[in-house]
Image: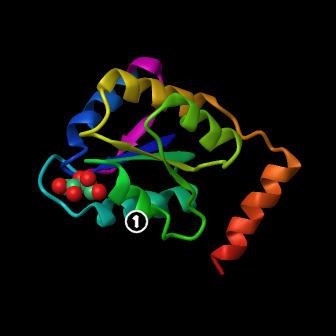
Amino acid sequence: MIAIASDHGGYALKQILLDHLAARGVPAEDLGCGGEPVDYPDYAGKLCRAVLAGQYERGILVCGTGIGMSIAANKIPGIRAALCADCYSAEMARQHNDANVLCLGGRTLGSELAKKIVDTYLDTPFSNAEHHRKRIAMIKDLER
Ligand code: RB5
């Protein structure tokens, strides 16, 4: 199960992505907002804590640029949030960084590109290579 959340700046793209995930048969839960003006750190916190609690396999956060969501999400120990604007980055975010949250810009990305980025992110496994595991462990050390 995937969690998805947005602020008002990401709401329109989130709706498109929810339809896309449903069409793909990917179970997804919308953690808000409903389009009203909100503060993106509230939604980043809500989604990331739920991912860390094991309620969701991974999460997708959408704000106007994806920047605010990624800054907020990466403050939470255990979260590796990747702001992606291209498919190669989405692939590497999974393969090399084992990113557990994808951040997208609702005002910066076209919807077709955003769908491809989401598909790439969801379909790419972590490489599990020793050197990548070591670097992720080093990131965990930085959290202490
Ligand atoms: C909201 O206007 C906007 O600041 C927010 O969606 C996001 O882009 C912040 O990084």
Image coordinates for residue 29, horizontal then vertical, percent: 39, 42
Indicate the quadrant containing the C terminus: top left, top right, bottom left or bottom right: bottom right
Residue closer to the observer: 100 or 86: 86
Image coordinates for residue 35, horizontal then vertical, percent: 15, 46
Residue at the spot x=51%, y=69% of the render?
76
On the picture, is 136 further left or further right than 3? right
On the picture, is 27 further left or further right than 135? left
Residue at the spot x=47%, y=22% of the render?
25
Disc 1 residue crowd, few under 14, some 14–19, many 20+, Cα 10 Å: some
Q: Is residue 142 magenta?
A: no
Asked whether the viewer can see residue 102, the reply is yes
Q: Is residue 71 above or below residue 23?
A: below
Query: Which three-letter amino acid code belongs to the residue tagged 1?
Result: Ala
Label 1 sits on a secondary structure element that is helix
On the picture, is 10 further left or further right than 124? left
Q: Which residues are magenta?
A: 23-32
Residue at the spot x=60%, y=43% of the render?
93
Residue closer to the observer: 17 or 117: 117
Task: Residue under label 1, please give it.
Answer: 72
Image coordinates for residue 27, horizontal then vertical, percent: 46, 32
On the picture, is 51 further left or further right than 33? right
Name the residue furthest top.
Answer: 23
Asked whether the viewer can see residue 21, the reply is no
Colouring scheme applied when the structure was drawn: rainbow
Q: Is residue 24 above or below residue 53?
A: above
Q: How many marks?
A: 1
Residue closer to the observer: 66 or 35: 66
Q: Is residue 54 above or below residue 140?
A: above
Residue at the spot x=47%, y=32% of the render?
86
Q: Is residue 25 magenta?
A: yes
Q: Is residue 116 above or below residue 3?
A: above
